[in-house]
Amino acid sequence: MKENPKILILRFSSIGDIVLTTPVVRVLKSQLNAEIHYCTKPAFEKIVKPNPYIDKVHTLTGSLGDLIKELKAENFDYIVDLHNNLRTRIIKLRMRKIPSFSYYKANIERFLLTKFKIDKMPKNHVVDRYMSAALPLGVKNDELGLDYFIPPADEVDIKTDLPESFHKEYVAVVIGGAHATKRLPFHKLVELCDKIAKPVVLIGGLMTLR
């Protein structure tokens, strides 16, 4: 194991999955004193860039070939693939001289569950499956949970930006989701908010209210 290694993490999408990879980022940085580069889509750059455990962000702004050239120039010691899709496999193939580690995506198990309701999914949490890809590098889960860092420019002043009734405490409910199956139906959202005995702030992407 190289001292102070330079590590590339691959995860192109989406917001929730990227946040779920943050424990891996943190342990690689803190336990190995590694230089961490994170590769994702431009739309998600603002999610990872404020992370103090990440030294540099690479985005797929042009062709995949151009991105691979950019990544090759960095001379990484290891690649940790936390997406394991066609793009990341091509990247690893084109950079095959660099040792790489990938998480188990359970595609077959997911297909059986969604199409036939046959539950063969791994019983461990997806964070633990992401972490398993990094374990060969000698790290261990620090059990400190997920990270989400908000840059100062995006911080909200509670006293000036929210009504007085929110100043003491409030509950934030994220309503966004890339797919309808990942969003709470409107009537369920109303039901949830009615059961929360505190002021509620709705945050996230646009949602079709039906």
Image: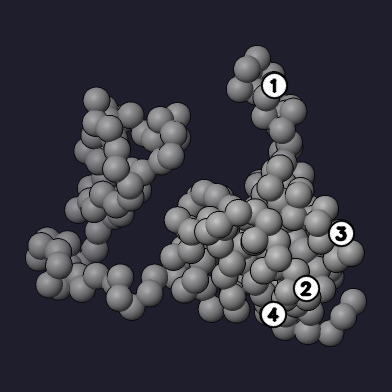
Callout in the foreground (3, 4)? 3
In the image, 104 versus 31, the foreground residue is 104
Q: Is residue 99 left or right of residue 63?
A: right
| Colour logic | one colour
Which residue corresponds to the image point at 36% horizontal and 43% vertical from the top-left? 176
Query: Could you give the CA–CA distance between mark 3 and mark 1, rounded to whole angstroms?
Result: 32 Å
Residue that label 4 marks: 35
**Amino acid type at mark 4:** Glu
**Amino acid type at mark 3:** Arg
The answer to whether residue 87 is above or below residue 59 is: above
Residue that label 3 marks: 96
Dot 2 surroundings within 10 Å: few (below 14), some, or many (20 or more)? some
**Amino acid type at mark 1:** Leu
Which residue corresponds to the image point at 20% horizontal and 73% vertical from the top-left? 157
Query: Could you give the CA–CA distance between mark 2 and mark 1, rounded to whole angstroms?
Result: 37 Å
Callout in the foreground (3, 1)? 3
Residue 40 appears at what percent x and percent y? 57, 58
